[in-house]
Image (tube, rainbow, N blue to C red):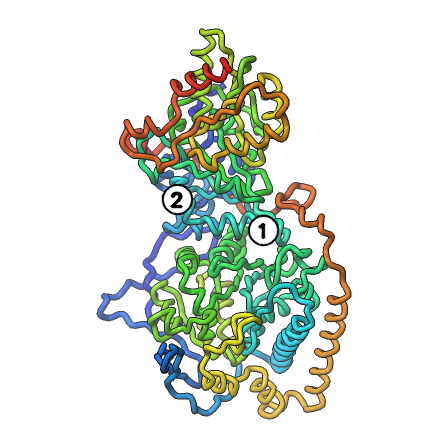
């Protein structure tokens, strides 16, 4: 099995889908000869030609609008955002034009909007954000946030094959930092299914994207103290795997929700509500939220480190919750 | 059309699709000249200003408001039966809106009613230039375009009455509906300009499937102020996509006059800055509208790119039924009332060309009335949706739609797998 980074896994996933289905194409800024700001589409234009790897003006609404229009003719566009921070520029196209199309007038929108999100790379307020919740809040969209190279490949392939608009958040901190063995054969990871990243009996950490790795590192350390964390990697924020959330709560009875997004309006609040609805009687302690601060993402490394949840934070909160 | 010189430099052609090409060198800036094709037989000049009048501020119009009404321009392309067909669509458009106004007064319409009064010639004659397998994205006043594309008055009436049998099954209002199966209409959303990149994308999708098609959408003098208008049209221009953009300059964006939306004399001048042809037509003359639309569609089908057509006319009612448009100077209404597209086209067909006898015209009008009566009765008596149908289907699954290329499977041309072009040093924010 080849060993691929998270970025290479996404690249390979898109590549294989373009080889498999002539209706799949890429559209975005600097994705052609330059290969994309992060080089996800490196070499694509040579292989698939400028007809299927389309460099656009700096016009995010046009990118999403054109992707949607092409999708109406049965194409499967993949729109790259150079940074997901810039998705606000296309907010109306995504939330009003695209997301509502199937409900309003029965028009499927099989397109993927993908790009790098997340911090810890000192990108500052406009190159580090986690804007996923704007889209989780919008019916009609699917929102995907992979944490591993295996999932990144399987989820991008599933997203491309899905008949719905998928907002695919790649975590730029993970792009080149993690790698794993990936099966050579074709596979997908279904949307809407969480996974147990680590089994444990004492308390559950529900998380996604880069924070999965923070949770796993915490679990490793706490295991030495005899505290066994269960780590649930959501993989998809919309649709959310309510069943997996309820099951892990029933198993451990204590929950810590960890995310890199800001606290207010983050998915932790929604998950807390789901636990209330699905597994309230199974709780043996308060639901704990561990999130970034309610501020923009600060630029300077000491500030950003303070802003983001860290292993030491999770250890502290997990110990408290365990003792509750 | 807009330019005497083609400024686009020669570039490597992508062989899969036809793009405009020219080896003409861009001339020095001092030598560049631009022309805007203008089909009009009169060029109205007036200006609107906000003026203080005692204790109130109101709009005042100045200009040539006594000019004689121009004739209908003979079409270069339309035959006699085609002219009569367009006339029939225009009548249906106007009379359907009159029926909607009555339904509203009877309390049968949910929400408001939007009118295209005075703009029927533009809606109907523009949409008439498209072929069945081409696409249209209407704006709120283009109900005539929807009729031409094959929706019936009952569809539009049921939309306004929020009926279960409406094209959106009650889930959206007014002209907010479409059809990707047969009529090739993209449903608009309420925000303005957003259809422009979408229609460009439809042309892009078709081109990838080996077919250059014409796609048409509309924007108003108000809506063209939005950023997405620029983004969409510029993208279409850069990609040579077959977009026909009608800029319907009806002088009012809700209550704001065109003079407060832009500084240029003619919105068609904007075309120069996009590097595409710009055309001006009298939006109350269906022959001019059709001719400009037809030429733009033919250009689109040749793969030569988009065209901006400014249609000058006047919104003869308020923004919607709730708006009495009292802010509009009366003289302006009077000026444009004399230029009513239906009255003038009727006169052209009956008296000028003598293509319709009075008896034939009366018969045609009676048929339109009868169709509307049938459709109105059907729409009125059709049921409201079940409350639970609000759940609907926000997501599409394979049981509701099979996604497949509409025109043809795109032809795939693959190159060799190249080695990476970049070095790790080129990576941003590692």
- A23 over B383 or under it: above or below: above
Decide if residue A156 is in sight here: no
The residue at which mark 1 appears reads as A101
Q: Of helix, strand and loop, which one carries label 2?
A: helix
| SS assignment at label 1 | helix
- Which quadrant, please, contains the N terminus of chain B? bottom left
> Residue A281: horizontal and vertical position, in percent?
63, 23
Q: Earlier in the sequence, mark 1 or mark 2?
A: 2
Residue at x 46% of width, y 16% of height: A320
Residue B313 vertical placement versus A249 (above, below):
below
Seen at 43% across and 11% down, the residue is A221
Residue nearer the viewer, B166 or A72: B166
Label 1: chain?
Answer: A
Kindly indicate whether the residue at mark 2 contacts the one at mark 1 (C-beta within 8 angstroms): no
Q: Is B331 left, or right, of B132 in this rendering?
A: left
Residue position marked by numbered label 2 in the rendering: A86
Q: Dot 2 surroundings within 10 Å: few (below 14), some, or many (20 or more)? A: some
């Amino acid at each position: 099995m080849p060993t691929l980074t998270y970025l290479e896994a996404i690249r390979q996933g898109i590549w294989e889908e373009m080889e498999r289905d002539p209706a799949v194409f890429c559209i975005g800024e600097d994705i052609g000869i330059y290969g994309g700001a992060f080089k996800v589409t490196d070499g694509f234009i040579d292989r698939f030609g400028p007809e299927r790897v389309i460099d656009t003006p700096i016009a995010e609404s046009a990118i999403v609008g054109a992707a949607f229009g092409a999708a109406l003719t049965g194409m499967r566009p993949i729109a790259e955002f150079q940074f997901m921070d810039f998705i606000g520029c296309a907010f109306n196209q995504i939330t009003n034009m695209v997301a509502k199309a199937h409900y309003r007038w029965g028009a499927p929108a099989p397109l993927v909007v993908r790009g790098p999100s997340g911090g810890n790379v000192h990108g500052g307020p406009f190159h580090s954000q986690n804007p996923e919740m704007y889209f989780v809040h919008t019916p009609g969209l699917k929102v995907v946030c992979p944490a591993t190279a295996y999932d990144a490949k399987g989820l991008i392939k599933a997203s491309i094959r899905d008949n719905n608009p998928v907002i695919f958040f790649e975590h730029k901190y993970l792009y080149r930092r993690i790698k794993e063995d990936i099966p050579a054969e074709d596979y997908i990871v279904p949307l809407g299914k969480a996974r147990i990243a680590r089994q444990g009996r004492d308390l559950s950490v529900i998380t996604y994207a880069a924070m999965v790795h923070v949770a796993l590192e915490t679990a490793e350390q706490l295991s030495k103290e005899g505290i066994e964390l269960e780590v649930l990697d959501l993989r998809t924020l919309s649709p959310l795997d309510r069943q997996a959330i309820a099951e892990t709560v029933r198993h451990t009875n204590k929950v810590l929700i960890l995310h890199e997004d800001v606290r207010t309006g983050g998915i932790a609040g929604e998950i807390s509500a789901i636990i209330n609805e699905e597994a309230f009687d199974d709780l043996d302690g308060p639901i704990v939220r561990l999130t970034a601060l309610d501020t923009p993402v600060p630029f300077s490394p000491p500030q950003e480190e303070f802003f983001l949840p860290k292993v030491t934070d999770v250890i502290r909160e997990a110990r408290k919750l365990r003792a509750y | 059309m807009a330019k005497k010189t083609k400024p686009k430099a020669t570039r490597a052609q992508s062989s899969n699709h036809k793009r405009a090409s020219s080896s003409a060198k861009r001339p020095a800036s001092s030598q560049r000249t631009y022309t805007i094709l203008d089909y009009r037989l009169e060029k109205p000049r007036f200006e609107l200003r906000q003026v203080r009048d005692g204790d109130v501020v109101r709009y005042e119009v100045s200009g040539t408001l006594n000019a004689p009404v121009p004739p209908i321009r003979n079409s270069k392309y339309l035959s006699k039966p085609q002219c009569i067909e367009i006339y029939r669509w225009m009548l249906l458009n106007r009379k359907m809106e009159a029926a909607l106004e009555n339904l509203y007064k009877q309390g049968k319409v949910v929400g408001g009613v939007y009118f295209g009064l005075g703009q029927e010639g533009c809606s109907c004659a523009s949409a008439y230039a498209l072929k069945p397998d081409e696409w249209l994205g209407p704006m709120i006043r283009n109900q005539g375009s929807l009729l031409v594309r094959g929706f019936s008055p009952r569809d539009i009436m049921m939309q306004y009455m929020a009926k279960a049998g409406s094209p959106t099954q009650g889930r959206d209002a007014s002209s907010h509906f479409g059809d990707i199966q047969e009529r090739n209409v993209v449903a608009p959303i309420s925000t303005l300009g957003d259809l422009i990149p979408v229609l460009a994308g439809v042309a892009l999708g078709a081109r990838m499937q080996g077919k250059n098609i014409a796609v048409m959408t509309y924007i108003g003098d108000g809506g063209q102020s939005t950023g997405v208008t620029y983004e969409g049209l510029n993208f279409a221009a850069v990609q040579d996509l077959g977009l026909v953009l009608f800029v319907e300059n009806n002088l009012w964006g809700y209550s704001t006059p065109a003079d407060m939306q832009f500084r240029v004399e003619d919105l068609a001048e904007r075309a120069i800055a996009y590097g595409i042809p710009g055309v001006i037509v009298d939006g109350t003359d269906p022959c001019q509208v059709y001719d400009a639309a037809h030429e733009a569609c033919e250009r689109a089908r040749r793969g030569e790119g988009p065209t901006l057509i400014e249609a000058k006319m006047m919104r003869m009612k308020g923004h919607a039924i709730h708006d009495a448009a009292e802010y509009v100077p009366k003289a302006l209404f009077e000026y444009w009332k004399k230029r009513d597209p239906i009255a003038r086209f009727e006169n052209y067909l009956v008296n000028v060309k003598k293509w319709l006898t009075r008896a034939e015209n009366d018969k045609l009008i009676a048929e339109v009335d009868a169709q509307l009566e049938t459709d109105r009765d059907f729409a009125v008596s059709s049921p409201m949706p079940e409350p639970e149908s609000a759940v609907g289907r926000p997501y599409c699954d394979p049981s509701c739609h099979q996604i497949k290329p509409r025109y043809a499977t795109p032809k795939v041309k693959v190159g060799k797998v190249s080695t990476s072009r970049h070095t790790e040093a080129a990576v941003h924010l590692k």
